[in-house]
Amino acid sequence: MTGTVLPDRRAVLSRRVRLLVAATITYNVIEAIVAITAGTVASSTALIGFGLDSVIEVASAAAVAWQFSGSDPEARERTALKVIAVSFFALAAYVTVESVRGLLGADPAEHSGVGIALAAVSLVVMPFLSLAQRRAGRELGSASAVADSKQTLLCTYLSGVLLAGLLLNSLFGWSWADPVVALVIAAVAVKEGREAWRGDACC
């Protein structure tokens, strides 16, 4: 963290980060329950994967919440960054495996109106949460808060991919569309995970 932020401003930003993290955790818990349930009903690996991504995001946000719950958040930042980095790698691994399974024709998904609605809502909500946390994290000089905001932003990309995949599958039967684009998301997750592991997230 940088020492240029005045103590009063630092306290305000720390509270803001805690509130944003709490909002992210709450939304992702709901998102995970809805996505995994809808994915199970529709036999959609993309929806189930999206729900599991939400679980990973909760772990990432919880790491930041743990960091800022202490009297000296700076001392906990390195550990929080490691947790966030591992969550990125876990997400990339899962998306890659499920994408390959999808391309090989495993478990073709049925139409899911609930899944389409969930992806559309997440596509609107997640960018605002990510932007607010990134701004607060950068001003505060917290690499972990910025890294977690990138995790939230990645959920936005996944929401877009999921929405496109569900729509293309429902409208045209193009079951290959989602796994192909999801592989790109996996590559981005690896990049962000490496940055978090090195502590470069603020840069």
Image: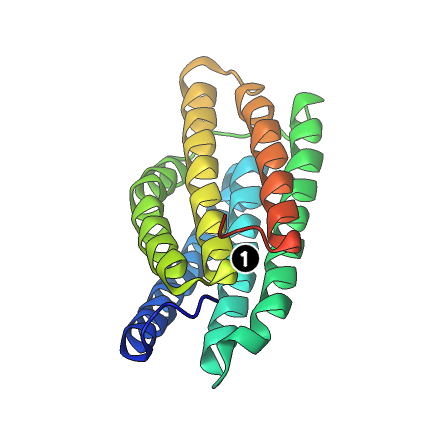
In the rendered image, the residue lying farthest to the front is 4
Q: Is residue 123 above or below residue 36?
A: above
Task: Return the x and y of residue 161 as percentages of the image width and height.
Answer: 47, 30
The foreground one among 192 and 109 is 192
Give the residue drawn at x 62%, y 67%: 78
Task: Return the x and y of residue 159 as percentages of the image width and height.
Answer: 43, 38
Applied colour scheme:
rainbow
Give the residue drawn at x 70%, y 42%: 93
Residue 17 can be seen in this image: yes
Q: Secondary structure at mark 1?
A: helix
Residue 48 found in image quarter: top right
The foreground one among 202 and 86 is 202
Task: Return the x and y of residue 163 as percentages of the image width and height.
Answer: 41, 31
Give the residue drawn at x 52%, y 16%: 174
Q: Is residue 46 above or below residue 74?
A: above
Residue 109 found in image quarter: top right
| Drawn side of residue 173 relative to residue 118, left or right | right
| Drawn side of residue 21 relative to residue 62, left or right | left
In the rendered image, the residue lying farthest to the top is 172
Q: Is residue 49 above or below residue 4?
A: above
Q: Is residue 49 above or below residue 18?
A: above
Residue 132 found in image quarter: bottom left
Give the residue drawn at x 35%, y 60%: 139
The foreground one among 125 and 118 is 125
- The kind of residue tagged 1 is Val
Task: Return the x and y of residue 115 as percentages of the image width and height.
Answer: 41, 39
* Residue pointed to by mark 1: 55
Badge 1 density bin: few <14, some 14–19, many ≥20, Cα 10 Å = many
